[in-house]
Amino acid sequence: MSPRRKRIILILFVLAGMGIASVLLLTAFEKNLLYFYSPSQVAAGEAPSTRAFRIGGLVMKNSVQRNPDSLEVSFVITDTVNTTKIVYDGILPDLFREGQGIVANGKLVNTGVFQAQEVLAKHDENYMPPEVADALAKAGGTYPLPENHKSK
């Protein structure tokens, strides 16, 4: 076999290996992404039912219910158009309260309830997670957005 032919075969193997590695890397990356959905998107069936995602909205007033025998808490979030019930078993952030914006990571369970693995609350009175603010703006809700928010 000529040296030129050996080089061409080597280059083809290297390119094939790089292609396979790229496909595997992108597949693993895609599986680990957490997409954001609003309660309206969840109600419309746009959210995945088999994998984890993020959901965000405002915690509705008088919706927080705590189980006195455990750390389980349930509450309802809204984007001012639709609502989603969230159940979380753990310690909520100190800044969690009714009427504020939150983002939760987790999955939908069979009953249409969102089972959260993590709940994140806003930092201060002027901050709202960008995903939540954008979802509220897109939903056309009447909630007053923070002055520093710019909708895309």
Image (cartoon, grey):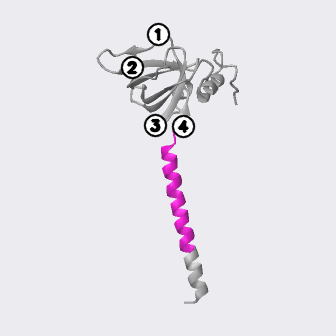
Return the mark for residue 28.
none
In this view, the residue in front, 48 or 87, is: 87
Q: Which residue is mark 4?
A: 35
Q: Which residues are magenta?
A: 12-35
Q: Residue 132 is drawn in which quadrant?
A: top right
Amino acid under label 2? Answer: Val
Q: Residue 88 is drawn in which quadrant?
A: top left
Residue 17 as seen in the image, left or right of residue 113: right
- Number of marks in the image? 4
Q: Which residue is mark 3?
A: 52
Query: Quadrant where the C terminus lies?
Result: top right
Q: Position of residue 110 (x, y in %)?
A: 39, 29
Q: Main secondary structure of the magenta part?
A: helix
Query: Circle 3: is it few (<14), some (14-19), or many (20+) Cα within 10 Å?
Result: many
Residue at position x 49%, y 16% in the image: 97
Q: Nearer the viewer, mark 4 or mark 2?
A: 2
The mark that comes first in sequence, 3 or 2, is 3
Query: Circle 4: is it few (<14), some (14-19), or many (20+) Cα within 10 Å?
Result: few
Q: Answer yes or no: do the residues labelled 4 and 2 have beta carbons within 8 Å?
A: no
Check residue 27 for magenta coloring: yes
Q: Which residue is mark 1?
A: 62
Q: Which residue is mark 2?
A: 73
Check residue 149 for magenta coloring: no
Q: Position of residue 62 (x, y in %)?
A: 47, 9
- The local secondary structure at tag 3 comes to loop
- The local secondary structure at tag 1 comes to loop
The mark that comes first in sequence, 4 or 2, is 4
